[in-house]
Amino acid sequence: MTECSGKVALVTGAGSGIGAACARRLASAGAQVVLTDRHPDGVKEVAAQIERDGGAAIALEADVTDPDAIERAVQAAVGTFGRLDLAVNNAGITAGREPVGTTPAEDWQRVLDVNLSGVFYSMRAEIAAMLHGDGGSIINMASVFGTVGFAGSAPYVAAKHGVIGLTKTAALEYATRRIRVNAVAPGFVDTPLLHVDGRRQRGAALMAPINRLGTAEEVAEVVVFLLSDRASLVTGSVYLADGGLSAR
Ligand SMILES: NC(=O)c1ccc[n+]([C@@H]2O[C@H](COP(=O)([O-])OP(=O)(O)OC[C@H]3O[C@@H](n4cnc5c(N)ncnc54)[C@H](O)[C@@H]3O)[C@@H](O)[C@H]2O)c1
């Protein structure tokens, strides 16, 4: 399938899990892909795999909490491939499980910095580049916990609700300027994010009605559909990919 042929895509947090799956799926759909992550090893490996499979990809080290690093990554995308059309703002972290009353301020700040400010800095740089081109399509990685609460994860839940507000606002601002902005809200997906010290956390206890965890590849399918012109009418929306978790 080559629905993204001729398009240039940037993915943050592309060295692992959902971001890596999105980068691979975008490449298989014909996009030239810029993979960014705060850890260089994962993105180098995924980019090399894409190239071995006949795709075009570059790997860059960029921390989404550093606005200058993100600007440089977007400039590198334009410098290398000539344009930026698609973006997946996916980098994200979790913190320890604590109720609000005992959540450390540093956990709050760290999660907000990566999961919310990181999306803002990324979108700001991407939109500037897209306005210079032919417009574009952006996916912000939210979570089902951007739509409902989850006891013990206040920073994560607050940040993901923020991502959805940011997504809707940017969609309104750029709707007439050919930039679509949507959020994807996965439920529990089997990635390293769910594992601590080699053991799966949370996911097993909160299984979705489909009775299994999602896969990163299943999320990537939704992402690439929304990025593609097949979703030309879709902007400002939140697409749940949670196996029915929030339908209960
Ligand atoms: N796995 C799930 O169950 C699940 C569910 C809902 C939403 N999500 C969201 O999906 C996104 C990807 O999660 P995942 O499950 O693939 O996790 P993951 O841990 O496998 O991958 C996250 C990637 O983001 C990178 N990253 C972290 N902080 C960064 C920073 N400051 N700058 C740049 N890169 C950074 C990590 O190095 C890693 O490569 C996150 O936003 C997460 O909140 C995951």
Image (tube, rainbow, N blue to C red):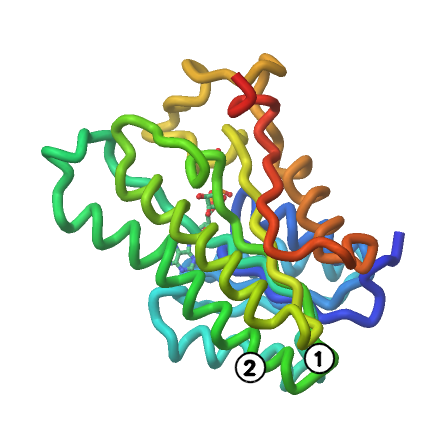
Q: Is residue 189 above or below residue 204?
A: below
Quadrant position of residue 32: bottom right
Name the residue: 69% across, 81% down: 83
Residue position marked by numbered label 1 in the rendering: 81
At label 2, the amino acid type is Ala
| 125 left or right of 137 in image | left
Name the residue: 58% across, 63% down: 171
| 74 left or right of 149 in image | right
| Mark 1–mark 2 distance (CA, rounded to whole Å) | 16 Å
- Cβ of mark 2 under 8 A from ligand 1: no
Helix, strand or loop status at disc 1: helix
Helix, strand or loop status at disc 2: helix
| 222 left or right of 202 in image | right
Residue 128: mark in rendering = 2
Q: Nearer the viewer, residue 195 or 65?
A: 65
Circles 1 and 2: CB atoms closer than 8 Å:
no
Residue 152 appears in view: yes
Tell me the crowding category of disc 2: few under 14, some 14 to 19, or many 20 or more residues within 10 angstroms, Cα based.
some
Q: Nearer the viewer, residue 127 or 169?
A: 169
At label 1, the amino acid type is Phe
| 241 left or right of 97 in image | right
Tell me the crowding category of disc 1: few under 14, some 14 to 19, or many 20 or more residues within 10 angstroms, Cα based.
some
